[in-house]
Image (tube, rainbow, N blue to C red):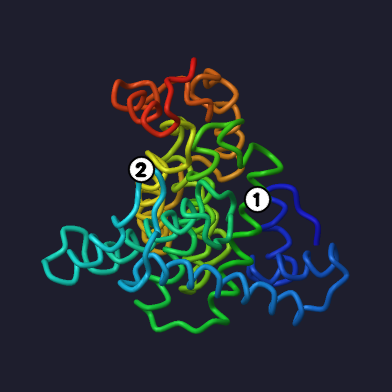
Amino acid sequence: MHYKNGIELLELCRVHDMHIHEIALKNECINSALEQDDIKEKMLEHFHIMATSIKRGLDEKERNIKGFMIGGEAKKLKKYHENHRSVCGETMSKAISYALSVMEVNVSMGRIVACPTAGSCGVLPAVLLSVKEKFDLDEEDMIKGLFTSGAVGSIIGKNASLSGAEGGCQAEVGSASAMAAAAVVEILGGTPKQALHGSAIALKNLMGLICDPVAGLVEAPCAKRNAIGTSNAMIAAEMALAGIKSIIPFDEVVVAMGKVGRMLPVALRETSEGGIATTPTGLRLKKKIFGQDKKR
């Protein structure tokens, strides 16, 4: 059940007549020597943590769900789409508020699932929970989605990077978006090929995205980029389910993303030495937070 890229994963799916999540589960059993039920139970626990982090950030009774720069935006968006006609539509608007919520819990040192990283932790929970609510899915579907997303994430990690410090935000939010797109495709009945088309589309859409956290904190622009990653995943999944293919195959997109990441100047790879981190406002916020304008 070993696979190092999308081609090998799809071949395993074809030979064994399985979905990606089934291959990923069997692969995990081999690697961990644990039984399927034990692994699935652990995955369900992860989903519950994701769902709880969404609820915490949106709960009116919760206080101090904020960081140095962000906090309360998830509730604002929730109130807006509950009381106004949404520009994005109810499902998308809810998903965006979910992504913001998880990021706010993260920056307040709350419990989240870093999937694939803390800086991109809002995307997958937001997409999974909003799709679950939209289509009245059950927790077994969420487990399947998490295994599918894990398979995609592992391939990206092996062949490119999941780190903003190494590959820019495209490697974090971009990967999270690609993982979420594949999960949605399989959960809603798409084929393994369609799932990887969705991943490829999502990853391409965020290709070149730099990592420039203000004051070196995973808050701004990180939270709103998680919202973008969430929307992007849902758009990519919708296209893939409709039969739209990525012109460039998934594996080639992953390799290209890795190359782009290595070409990015160090200043644009989570060092806070470029991008919006060095705007006048970005520098002012850093000085305000840390009490001095640290040398870049």
On-image quarter of the N terminus: bottom right
Residue that mark 2 sits on? 69
At which x and y percent is residue 234? Answer: 38, 59
At which x and y percent is residue 144? Answer: 59, 73
Report the front residue among 210 and 271. 271
Report the front residue among 176 and 76. 76
Graded by Cα atoms within 10 Å as few (under 14), some (14 to 19) or many (20 or more), the crowding at tag 2 reads some
Q: Classify residue 34 as left or right of residue 80.
A: right
Q: Classify residue 279 as left or right of residue 118.
A: left
Residue occupying image coordinates x 59% and y 27%: 259
Relative to residue 73, is residue 55 depicted above or below? below
Graded by Cα atoms within 10 Å as few (under 14), some (14 to 19) or many (20 or more), the crowding at tag 1 reads many
Q: Classify residue 103 as left or right of residue 162.
A: left
Q: Amino acid at mark 2?
A: Met
The image quarter in which residue 222 lies: top left
At which x and y percent is residue 263? Answer: 56, 20
Residue occupying image coordinates x 37% and y 56%: 100
Mark number displayed over residue 6 = 1
Q: Secondary structure at mark 1?
A: helix
